[in-house]
Amino acid sequence: MKKNLNILLILLFIPLAVLRADEGMWLPSLIGELRIGDMQEKGFRLSADDIYQINQAAITDAVVSFGGFCTGELISAEGLLITNHHCGLGSIQRHSSLENNYLDEGFWAMSREEELPNLELYVRFLREVQDVTETVLEGVEDGITEQSREQIIGRNIRKLQDEAMDRTQWKAVTKSFYYGSEYCMFLYEEFNDVRLVGAPPKAVGNFGGDTDNWIWPRHTGDFSFFRIYADENNNPATYAAENVPYKPRNFLPVSAGGVDTGDFTMVCGFPGNTDQYLLSSDLEMIIGKSLPAKIRIRTERMEVMQNQMDKSDEIQIKYSAKYARVANAWKKWQGVIKGINKVEAIAQKKDYEQKFSGWVCRDPAGRREYENVLDSLECLIKKESDLILAYEYQREILGAIEILRFAGNFMDLVEAFQNREIGEYYLDNTIDIAREQSSDFFKDYTVAIDMEIFRRLLIIYMADLPETYYPVPLQEAMQKYRGDIDGYTTYLFDKTIFSSKEKIMSLLEDPDQADLKKIENDPVFSLARACEDLSAKIRHSYRSITDLKNTIYRLYVKGLREMEPDRGFYADANGSMRIAYGQVRDYRPRDATRYGSLTTLDGIIEKSYLSMEDYIIPEKLRELYEQKDFGPYTVNGKVPVCFIASNHTSGGNSGSPVLNADGHLIGINFDRNWEGTMSDYVYDVNQCRNIVVDIRYVLFIIDKYAGAGHLIDEMKIIPK
Ligand code: ARG
Ligand code: GLU
């Protein structure tokens, strides 16, 4: 019997071990210690030193943080960089005009002279990682408040970073791990002359648009090319025409051999934010309260935008980027809720908490510090839950009203006026900024949309929150209008000068005291100001809870790591470079349905027959397809387009290189599957997939579609 029981136990635990398999995003500096054995067992043919090494060329030397919001990688000795189309979009858009519509037509620099500078853009190479926990925590005593802890830590970090920057001239960034138990300092070399080299038309680069966003099967050619420029000594320099292409320490060879189901894959990039160690009640609050509220609010916003966009092409152009931004998280959140329910993550977490309690009880004296961890967290989560809507609505409702944000900017101007004596220069400067902001704002503004969004969101705000959370002018108005939200909305938008470009621009021509009065007496301005005060108060109360929570989560995770010393914990994403590994793998999204792991050009053509706006393709692509003019970029006669793998990724991993077992580039990461977006909270190897554009599709488009084969000549292609 005992023996049978043992076998049963072993059988029970094997699936758990398998489940953990591909989970995790690991610091490159810890790969050697923690993961390399497992990676090699799964097929990786290189060593930990090939991934990351100080002062020696390694894979991580070919990867950059792209503008702080995406990832990019070097693919030539001449500073050529590839990232996603949606990461380069800002630059592509800024260079586009009606005559040169790079968004619609694509852009390809046929010579270095044609590459386009982007003053707002930077890339950063990670040069060094240091564990600085000891120094950062110097002087932090047990039992001090979280605020004093932050102060001490802040001082220590500043000192450390200043020294490092003096020593290296690199940029130092320190990040906290495991809720502030550990700290690492990252040293980055930053380059500011980054030029646009090429981008496909959006019908390729954003094929499928919002319809396919977060969706597998996918067919998007989500890539664009940039080039890093340096001064004559190969050092970072601000833009200058005479700068030369940067010679990187390392660049990634490109695999022409491609991938197949089951192959080892690895992703290296900069994921932004995850929450893997939350308690079940925290997760319950998120999927039961916070996300549904935010989804509902965004549904209203999107409906209003869509109604107006359907009526006018002009509004369509003005609002399509805004709409996409709102829709991206809106769609993701719905996937998160579904995914968490599907894998029964709440129940899983509850079991895990029980396990923790049991572990604490088994040695009450030795584990006394953990005795109250769960109870205290529960109590704080309850408190947070009471405040969560008020907190979220500041951003999702008050922050969603365009005119409030715009009028809020004028607080700087009012202040500059009041402090005139400090210097006319400061005032002039502020006026210049206000002019620029105003012309930007009105370029894409439609008052009818904003007004209707204001009206609808105000209804939600007032229905869900008690009056103590109303900004003062709203309290007063509601008395005056006896709760008539329509009447108040009409009054506000009739009365304000902030909805009129003429009025604002003429006011900014040469503003005087009378103009200042006009601003200060404006009802939208007063509301914006009151919202700002209110938000600051709410943020303050909210932080007093989350700071405490943070302290106790720190203890909780410390306990978990003691409880499972062999598990190999990884810290939540925090914008630092991480390695994830897994394999090309299909999945079952729902009963009786299996999604294959690779898509091809055939799928693009199929979708194009659905006659949907998001699936319109360029004529040239159809011609290539019909003439089977595929060049060498085929497998069994078909052009590969995208694939999925089980790499644990998150927002910020866009543009990350996806590498094979030899460290060759096989694709560019750009999304996750809808059923797997909950991986920011719980990763499940059967459901979670990252979506990758196949490098062979990239090569096909530049060569066959764009005739930009000179870019391929620059790369190091590893033949099939
Ligand atoms: N969902 C991807 C990422 O967060 C891609 C977003 C851009 N693409 C789009 N069709 N909106 O962020
Ligand atoms: N598209 C996301 C980004 O821009 C990556 C997708 C994800 O969240 O996994 O970072």
Image: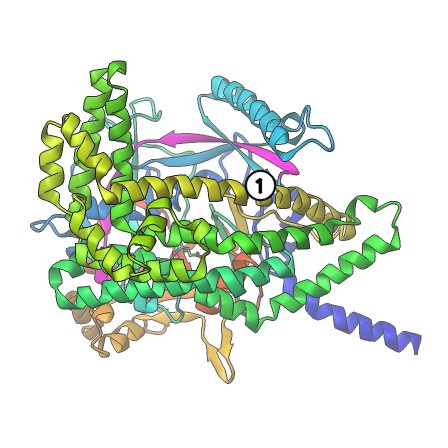
Residue 230: percent from left, percent from top: 31, 28
> Considering the image in quadrants, where does the N terminus appear?
bottom right
Residue placed farthest to the right in the image? 1
To which quarter of the image does residue 489 belong? bottom left
What predominant SS class does the magenta segment belong to?
Answer: strand
Q: Residue at x 41, y 35 (%)?
A: 124
Task: Identify the residue under disc 1.
Answer: 544
Colour scheme of the picture:
rainbow
Q: Is residue 660 visible?
A: no
State yes or no: residue 26 in magenta: no
> Considering the image in quadrants, where does the C terminus appear?
bottom left
On screen, residue 540 versus residue 496, left or right, reads right
Q: Is residue 355 visible?
A: yes
- Say which amino acid is labelled 1: Ser
In the rendered image, the vertical position of residue 136 relative to residue 267, given as above or below: above
Mark 1 surroundings within 10 Å by alpha-carbon count, few (fewer than 14), some (14 through 19), many (20 or more): few
In the rendered image, the vertical position of residue 472 relative to residue 279, given as above or below: above
**Is 249 or 596 nearer to us in this picture?**
596
Residue 77: percent from left, percent from top: 35, 38
Magenta residue span: 180-204
Residue 43: percent from left, percent from top: 58, 58
Ligand 2, image quadrant it occupies: bottom left
Query: Mark 1 falls on what kind of element?
Result: helix
Residue 157: percent from left, percent from top: 56, 26
